[in-house]
Every structure is written in structure tokens, then in C-alpha cells.
Image: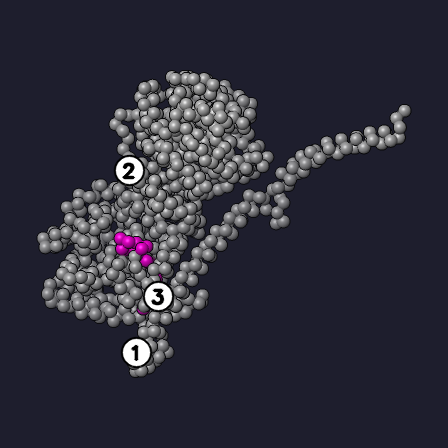
Amino acid sequence: MLTKKMRRRQLLQLWSLVLLCSIPMSLYIYQQLRDRTQASRHFLGFTDREAKLAERVKEVEQQNQFLRRQLSISREKLVSIMSDQQQQQNSDNDNNNRHKADDQNNIPKVDTNSVRQIKTNKDININDINSNKLTDEKSLSMPIETNLVIADDDSGGTKLLTNNCHNSHEDIVPKCEVIHVVIVCAGYNSSRSVVTLIKSILFYRKNPLHFHFISDSIAHTILQTLFKTWSVPALGVSFYLADNLQSDVSWIPNKHYSGVYGLMKLVLPKALPQNMDKVIVLDTDITFATDIAELWKLFAKMTKESLALVENQSDWYLGKLWKNHRPWPALGRGFNTGVMLFSLKRLREFNWSVVWKMVAEKELMSMLSTSLADQDIFNAVIKQYPFLVYKLPCQWNVQLSDNTLSDALCYTEVQDLKIIHWNSPKKLKVKNKHLEFFRNLYLTFLEYDGNLLRRELIGCNNTKENAIYYESSNLMNQIDEDDPCYEFRLSRVTQHRTHLYYIEYDYEPSPEGNDVTLVAQLSMDRLQMVEALCQHWEGPISLAMYMSDSEVQQFLGYAQTSEILRERKNIGYHIVYRDGPFYPINHLRNVALQQVNTPFVFLTDVDFLPMFGLYEYLKRSVAAMGLESASKKALVVPAFETQRYRISFPKTKAELLSMLDMGTLFTFRYHVWTKGHAPTNYANWRTATTPYRITWEQDFEPYIVVKRDIPEYDTRFVGFGWNKVSHIMELYAQGYEFIVLPNAFIVHMPHAPSFDIAKYRSSSSYRKCLKILKVEFVKDLNKRYNRQFTASDTFKH
């Protein structure tokens, strides 16, 4: 018989065993209960998805409030500066002037625009005597707003009050009336500038908008993709190819940096649809600080005039900037063409297309060329036909040129600024004593999250400008909200705002027909790897970059200051703006792949460094193996890795083999995911001197060189897991054969693990959804190619 002590020991061991077994069981039960109750654990009864949506709405509102607060602070700061300057000026006057100033402070301030108008009228009368061209003095000198008064509003700021000498309903733009805006945009830099302008307009707007772009082929490609992927409600876009209009203006010699595109606004009445009656015309280098509908409603003031512009705010057209300065003729100070209102119907009735050419031909006989592009010709026409113009208040075009007098001519009197115009070639580097305020306004919109501007206009959902938005929203509405993998499926149909060719790209493929572009994607945390990649690969590169609006500006500064990157014009940087919880890796790859202009692509990742000379080696291999005619061959570049952040990179295959033997390098992922590259047959590669064929195996994910017209990556796979495996599997289903190159290699450089791989490892629901997506992909693949892949083969990742 067992002793009592031994019996007690056995009982204790039994209970210990039971306890050990119950712990994992308890954890499993807890996990299941937590997953089941996850949808209703919020105290208000919200599901997780609804709570996240509510949180997102809250974030949007907070950002909007922050932006408005920041703009208000900047404006108040400017008002304070102007007030201090006015007080200083008053203190320098004599006692009588100070007494008058004190008396004047006790009555409402009256806009002195009429005083300047009298001066302008005086100039007009003198010019009229000389030219006998003034036919309607009243139409030129009529003030836009009479009895203008600055008064406090409810928010503690300032607002403009006008004498209601007309029915108030004339100033109201119907909420669903479409506002038409024309912008001339050409090239890469201009395409960047126009985005900030569009953001500032969208932030304040309350009406449907339709943008009309006069663009070259570059800007057309960039902006068409941008607006299609932006999917902003109540926003329409039309394009007019500038090449078809150049013949009308290319005969004009122009010294302005804008070139022939700086003359395009002259042909707008001819280029725009004949049924369009009125349009706002804007330069790309302006920033709005108010609702564009306020500008649109000023058309009601133009009873007879065809054009509305703001007076030029420098002495350029007065000929006082330097000795022997001889500007084009202008009415008084002349007018700036950065912001204009066009009554297209009246301009056509005036026979504008004929008149401006006659005036330009006449003036060019003595002036020889334009200095300020279309602005010179517009002013010459207005000089001869002043009844055409309606003078806009100066706050609708506060000009920041090198010689601007805007602080004296404009916003010392009117502090309610509407539009800031960076009309100097120096842009944000122009010298101005209030530059900080203007820069803050511009930079606020520059880094503002454009996704927050996708807000619907209440009650204006039936306009044709909603077509693009409804196309994307309908796809989202088709997804079952109760699907446990709802966020994965939503990511597949999410429209990611995309800005192609963010920096100038200039590359023509080699004529031999064997050129290769390196294709990769990255986020901000991998940006530092681009320089090293460029040192190893001298050929063309197509990069899709997943970033926020503010991160994009950091990247731009990095690229423009990097000695390596700023010299390269053969790198296409394509910005895909962040949106959603997952990293859309396959969508990014597709974006980069779609922009390739060479016949072949090298599909890799940005954290791999190619061997030196790989670009030329791949071109030779493509030609030697006849890939131009063989459409279904994939050349495999063997992948290796190092765990060291600093290594002496192998210059040859012999050096790499030596480092393999020493343990400095390893075959890629040999210790965590051998199946991913095992079919490459590294043992054979060590001694191979000629290319050799290999057989596809499940979970194979090599880095390959193929023709650019291959199938795109499957976008259902986001974040970590099966994103590249699925693509290689589809190539195999199509009948591709895989051939390993014997003298090529790439080396993976170490870095911190991505956020997505951490989610994959820590979240059971993530892994469960990935498993579901694999099954669905294999079923789709079998149906599409009539193959017999089994779903069970896909679960070994």
C-alpha cells in the first residue's frame, strides 16, 4: 500500500496536471468569448466598426476645427501687425493730424477704394484724350461694393458690411448651382501646385464644382488620375489638350517663365464649350481663404462688362521699376490676370478671338515680345476697350510679387483677405514683411489631409459632378457590413488618392528593345533606402510611395536636397495617399507597374540592394534569352540576406559565395520561411554558369524579370501575407516558366519589422481572414484558368 505521503504527492501532481491543461483551454474560451462579444462591447451598443467610424468623424471635425482656428490666429496676427503699423504712423504725424485721426476712430471706417478709383478715373480721362478709346467711363469706374465698412462679427473677428442698395437675393448663389473654374496647368511642378489650390477651394466650398483644365499630356495624365482616385462628391473635371490650342498663341514671342502655356488664357472663349456662359479663371499659384461662391456671385455685378480683374499691385505698368523700363500699355496700374471672371457669351459677341490678336500684332511691332505673357496682352486690349473690364476688390487677388505694394494698396484698408497670389518666380521665398502669415496659410493647405475633403454636399446629390464619387461608394456599399473580414474587403475597393510623377520624370527607353525598369513600393519608414538603391541600380525606377500629405512634403524636401536623388530624372515617384488600416501593398505594386515605359520590369522590393551592374546584366540576359519574342518567361534573380546593418557588399558571385560560407550572408528567409525561395535551388546556383529552369512549387515567391504586360497583383491581399505568392501562382497558372539567372543576385538589408507583420502575428482574426482570402483566391484562379489547385495547399504559410 502506498503511504499517505505518496498518495498526497500523486494527488498534487494530478491537480497540477489538470491546472496546466485548463490554462490554455481557459485562454481559448476567453478568446472565443471576446471575439463574439467584440461587436457589442461598447457601452452605447456600437459595433467596433461603427465606433471606429464615429471616431473617424470626430477626427475629421477636430482637424477642420484646428485648421479654422489656425487660419483665424494667422489672420488676427496680421490684423494686429497692421494695427501696430497704423498706430506708429499716427504717432509720427503732427498734432492736427493726430487729432483728425482720433476723430476718425470714433466713426465707422469707410473703404477708400473710391479714392483710388477717382485717381484711376483721372488716369483714364487722360488716356481717353490721347487715344479717344474710352466709350463707357461709368462701366469702368463703377465700384463693386459701395459704402464698404469693417465691423465686428459674432466670432470676435472682422467682416465686411455693404450698403444694401440692391435685393439681397442677388448675392446668394443657389446651393446646387455648379461653379465652373478654368486652370491652365502644364508639367510636373505646376501639377503639384494646383493640388494645394484645389484643397483650399474644397475646404471652404458649399457648391458643386467643375474644373476645366487646359493641360499638356503630362498634367493630363497626373490630374486625371488624381481626381479619379480622389472621388470627391459634387466635383467634375474636364480636360482640353493644350497641343490643340498652341497654334493660336505660339507665334507670340514670350519672355515669361511660363512659356507658351502662359498665353493659353487668351484662347479660352474659343476652347471652352460654346454653351458655357461664365467661368472663373485662376492661376495655379494662388490660395483661397474663403468660399469660391463669394467670387462667383460677383458675376451679378457685371451688368455689361465681359471681364473682371483686380488692379495690378506693383508699379510695373507705370514704368517706374528701373531706368528705361518700358512696359506694355495698360490702363493706370494695369490689371493682374491671376484671378479673372470671364463672361464667355459677351466675349464671343465682342469677337474676342479676333480683337486680341489684332491688338497683340500691333503692340508687338514695337514691344517685340511679352514680358508677363497673357497679362501684357489682356492689359493692352483693356487699354483700348476699357468698357470690357469690371474692377474686382483687391482682396480677391493679394499679389506677392517681388515689387508688390499690396500692403499699401490693399490690405491696409481691407483686412478680409480672400485670395493670396504667389506671383513671383521665387514663390514662398519672396521677400515680404508679412510673409510668415501668407506662408502659414499656404502650408496649412499644403499638408492638409485631402481625404477629409471627401464630404458630401447636402441636397446636391443629383448633379453629374457626382458620377466618380458614386462609382466608388457603390462598390463599398455592396460589401456586407456583418462580414468578419469587412475591413479586408473594404480595403480592396478603397479608392486611394494617387498623384503620379510627383517629381519630374524624363526617360526614354533604349532603342534595342531590352530595357528594364525596377519596380518597387515603400512607405515613409523605408525612404532612407532609396538612395542606396539608386547607387546600385542606374536604370529607370518606378516607385509607389504610401504616405500622408505631410509626409509627402518631407519626402519632397529629402529628394530635392539629396545629391544622389536630385540628379536622377529616370525615377518615377508615384504618391498613393494613406487611407485605411492596412498597407495596400499589391495596389502600390500595380500603380508602379502601370507607369513603366520600358518593355521589361524587374519586380522587387525596396529593401533589396541589387548587385552592382545588375541593370546591364539583365538587359543582356533579356536579349540573349529572346524574351522579346517569348512572352511567358520569368527570369529569377536569387535573393540573399544579411543580419548586419553594415557590410562590405559583394562585388561578384565569388565574393558572395565566400560570405555565404562565412555566415555573413544567408539565402533569403532560410530560417523563417524556407518554402518561399526553396525552388530557386541555391545548391545548383552555386556552381551554375548558365541559366537553368526550375519547377514552380506552392508558396514560391521569387523576384523576377518579366514583360511589363503581365497580370496585375491581386489587391484583396493587403498588409502581410500572400501578396507576392498569389501573383507568382497566377503566372504559373498562365503557363509561365521560371528560369534562374546564374550570375545575378540581390541582398536584403535589415530593418525594423513592419506594422502589418506585427498585426499578422498578434491577431487571430487577421490570420483567419487571410486564410479565407486564400481560399477565395484559389477558387477564382481555378475558374479563370481552368486549373485544379487545391485550397489546402495554400495554408502552409
How would you rate the neighbour count of disc 3 (Cα within 10 Å): few for under 14, some for 14-19, many for 20 or more? some
Q: Secondary structure at mark 3?
A: loop
Residue at 38% in and 17% down: 690
Asked whether residue 426 is drawn in magenta, I would say yes
Q: Earlier in the sequence, mark 3 or mark 2?
A: 3
Residue at 27% in and 45% down: 186
Identify residue for label 2.
506
Q: Quadrant of the N terminus?
A: top right
Tell me the mark number nearer the camera, choosing from 3 and 2.
2
How would you rate the neighbour count of disc 2 (Cα within 10 Å): few for under 14, some for 14-19, many for 20 or more? few
- Give the CA distance from mark 1 to mark 2: 60 Å
What is the count of numbered marks?
A: 3
Residue 486 shown left or right of residue 414 in the figure: right
Work out whether residue 91 or residue 727 is closer to the camera in this orientation and state it.
91
Question: Compared with residue 505, is residue 149 higher up or lower down, i.e. above or below?
Answer: below
Identify residue for label 1.
93
Identify residue for label 3.
415
Asked whether residue 397 is drawn in magenta, I would say no
Farthest residue in the right direction? 1
Q: Which residues are magenta?
A: 413-429
Q: Position of residue 223 (x, y in %)?
A: 33, 43
Q: Amino acid at mark 1?
A: Asn
Residue 404 shown left or right of residue 763 in the figure: left
Q: Position of residue 609 (x, y in %)?
A: 41, 32
How would you rate the neighbour count of disc 1 (Cα within 10 Å): few for under 14, some for 14-19, many for 20 or more? few
